[in-house]
Image: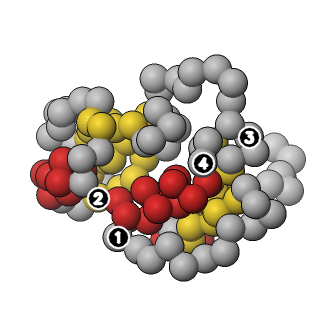
Amino acid sequence: MKASPLLSEVGAVFVPVQHIEEARDWYCRILGIDADQDILFGHLYCIPLQKGVTLILDSKIFPKKTPSDAPLFQFNTQDIEAAYQHMQELDVELVSGIENGHWFTFRDPDRNVLMVCKC
């Protein structure tokens, strides 16, 4: 097989959002981090995550259609029960309960479905 110039790693995940400031505040709140980065070009907010991945909130690419019911991506956790309780305390819209003792889904303010998974 020919070697690929693509690296087998993810550098960033884009999340379409309607209102960049509100999305920034919401994501930073659920992740327990300060919203202290600049909003770039009036529509991008980059949240550096562990292992070199960046979560990029982008209000310029917000779709005109309803977001899918399939999760865009997952956040990892070592304690699924604590993660679920954390989201309940923050009044996050939960789509499911904890399934199979390993994962649950929720919606962000723009109705994007996301997942938390015990890894």
Seen in the image, is 64 located left or right of residue 98? right
Q: Earlier in the sequence, mark 4 or mark 3?
A: 4
Measured Cα–Cα span from mark 4 to mark 3: 11 Å
Marks 1 and 2 in Cβ contact (< 8 Å) = no
Q: Label 4 is placed on what type of residue?
A: His
Quadrant position of residue 40: bottom right
Marks 3 and 1 in Cβ contact (< 8 Å) = no
Residue in view at x 47 percent, y 33 percent: 111
Q: Which of marks 2 and 3 is nearer the N terminus?
A: 3
Q: Label 1 is placed on what type of residue?
A: Gly
Disc 2 target residue: 77
Q: Earlier in the sequence, mark 1 or mark 2?
A: 1
Residue 94 rendering spot, x and y as whole percentages: 27, 36
Residue in view at x 29 percent, y 58 percent: 77
Disc 4 target residue: 19
Marks 4 and 3 in Cβ contact (< 8 Å) = no
Measured Cα–Cα span from mark 4 to mark 1: 20 Å
User: Could you tell me which quadrant the N terminus lies in?
Assistant: top right
Image disc number at residue 61: 3
Give the crowd class for mark 4: few <14, some 14-19, many >=20 residues within 10 Å: some
Give the crowd class for mark 3: few <14, some 14-19, many >=20 residues within 10 Å: some
SS state under label 3: loop
Give the crowd class for mark 2: few <14, some 14-19, many >=20 residues within 10 Å: some
Residue 51 rendering spot, x and y as whole percentages: 52, 71
Q: Label 2 is placed on what type of residue?
A: Thr
